[in-house]
């Protein structure tokens, strides 16, 4: 892959896939945006990324699944609800042949927003104590 082939925006990323995959990626994007309206969008690690006081979640299309990368803490927190999906320390695989669990994706994203906000609040408190 040439450097020029690397998508620069999430729109570019999504547009590079066939319609069925594009639809799933668009659903994923819309769900994340609703759950984290203050997060900014960017491409990081060559995949769509949402950022709010640090990386929030990433997602990517693969041959047989859509990967969702919400950080290990979220996977641990939602372990029971994720039992129907292939997971690893920091990743969840949603099979292409099944509908995306949009409510679960939203809940996990909200969880990550809350985590990042708490982390940011702690940083601000530490700064104030040093002053």
Image: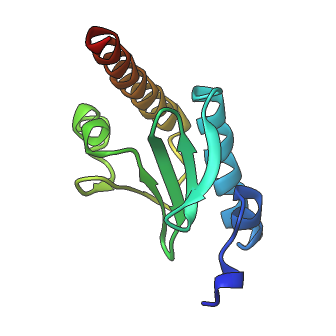
Look at the image and tell me in which quarter the C terminus lies: top left
Query: Which residue shows up at 39% across the image and 23% down it?
Result: 120
> What colouring does the structure picture have?
rainbow
The quadrant in which residue 6 appears is bottom right
Looking at the picture, tell me which residue is in the foreground, 124 or 65: 124
User: Is residue 128 something one can see in this rendering?
Assistant: yes
Tell which of 27 and 8 is nearer to you: 8
Q: Quadrant of the N terminus?
A: bottom right
Can you give x and y, in whole percent of width and height, for residue 42 in the image?
63, 52
The residue at the point 41 percent across, 31 percent down is 112
Residue 75, quarter of picture: top left
* Vertical placement of residue 42 versus 129, above or below: below
Horizontal and vertical percent position of residue 59 = 52, 55
Above or below 126: residue 113? below
Locate residue 105 relative to residue 129 in the image: left or right. right
Is 96 placed left or right of 130 in the picture? right
Q: Is residue 41 left or right of residue 121?
A: right
Q: Quarter of the image holding residue 122? A: top left
Asked whether 48 or 82 is in front, the reply is 48
Work out which residue is located at the far bottom of the displayed protein and give it: 1
Going 49% across and 52% down the picture, which residue do you hit? 58
> Residue 41 location in percent, x, y?
65, 45
Q: Residue furthest front?
A: 131
């Amino acid at each position: 892959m040439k450097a020029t082939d690397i998508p620069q925006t999430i729109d570019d990323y999504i547009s590079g896939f066939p319609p069925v995959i594009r639809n799933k990626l668009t659903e994923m994007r819309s769900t994340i945006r609703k759950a984290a309206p203050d997060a900014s969008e960017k491409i990081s690690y060559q995949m769509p990324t949402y950022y709010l006081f640090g990386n929030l979640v990433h997602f990517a299309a693969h041959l047989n699944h859509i990967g969702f990368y919400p950080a290990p803490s979220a996977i641990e927190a939602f372990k029971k609800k994720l039992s129907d999906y292939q997971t690893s320390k920091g990743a969840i695989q949603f099979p292409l042949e099944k509908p995306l669990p949009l409510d679960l994706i939203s809940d996990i994203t909200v969880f990550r927003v809350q985590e990042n906000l708490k982390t940011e609040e702690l940083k601000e408190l530490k700064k104030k104590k040093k002053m």
